[in-house]
Amino acid sequence: MQHILIIVNDAPYGSERLFNALRLAIQLNEHESPPAKVSLFLLSDAITAVLPKQQPGEGYNIGQMLEIILAQQGEVKFCRSCVHTRGLQDLKVIEGCEEATMEDLAQWVLVADKVITF
């Protein structure tokens, strides 16, 4: 099984980068041949995507897309220092998303077959 790591830096609704990264992750998780394990690491303003109950209005819903990835057995981690820099450490996050460190990201990079950044 191929391990694909997707790293995202952009805010959930400022551009379509995170949206497109999640679209790709969902599609990769749906492939059966060859199967892939998809991991998603959120940095910078992308960490705000893990905040629950966001109501984006019409169009896509990043929170729902993250829940789909988690339901597909994908992993979602977000940068602890990015959370603390933004003063968001006391807020709840979408269940299944995990706070992580740069060391965690480094380990994922070392074991990934492919690394994609958005």
Image (spheres, rainbow, N blue to C red):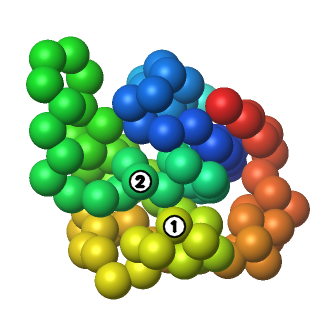
Pinpoint residue 2: horizontal percent, then vertical percent: 68, 43
Residue under numbered circle 1? 86
Asked if the residue under mark 1 is in contact with the one under mark 2, i.e. CB atoms within 8 Å, the reply is: yes
Q: Amino acid at mark 1?
A: Arg
Q: Is residue 65 visible to us here?
A: no
Q: Looking at the rendered structure, which numbered label has been put on residue 48?
A: 2
What amino acid does circle 2 point to?
Thr
Q: Position of residue 28 (x, y in %)?
A: 51, 30
Disc 2 vs disc 1: which is toward the camera?
A: 1
Quadrant hosting residue 118: top right
Based on the displayed image, in which of its 4 quarters is residue 9 positioned? top right
How far apart, in angstroms, are the residues tagged by discs 2 and 1?
Answer: 9 Å
Residue at image location 54% in from the left, 77% down from the top: 84
Residue at 21 percent across and 57 percent down: it is 52
Kindly state the secondary structure of the residue where label 2 is placed: helix
**Above or below 31: residue 108:** below
Q: Given the current orientation, which residue lies at the most extreme bottom position?
A: 90
What element does badge 1 sit on? loop
Question: Camera-side residue: 97 or 89?
Answer: 89
Question: 4 or 52: which is nearer to us?
Answer: 52
What is the number of the mark on residue 23?
none
Spot the residue most to the right.
110
Q: Using the image, determine if residue 2 lies above or below residue 86.
A: above
- Expressed as whole percent of the image width and height from the top left, the position of residue 14 reads 46, 28
Q: Quadrant of residue 97?
A: bottom left
The reply to whether residue 50 is visible in this rendering is: yes
Q: Measured from the top left, where is residue 50 in percent x and y?
A: 36, 57
Sort mark 1 into few (<14), some (14-19) or many (20+) by Cα contacts within 10 Å.
few
Q: Residue at x 78, y 39 (%)?
A: 114
Crowd rating for badge 2 (residues with CA inside 10 Å; few <14, some 14–19, many 20+): many
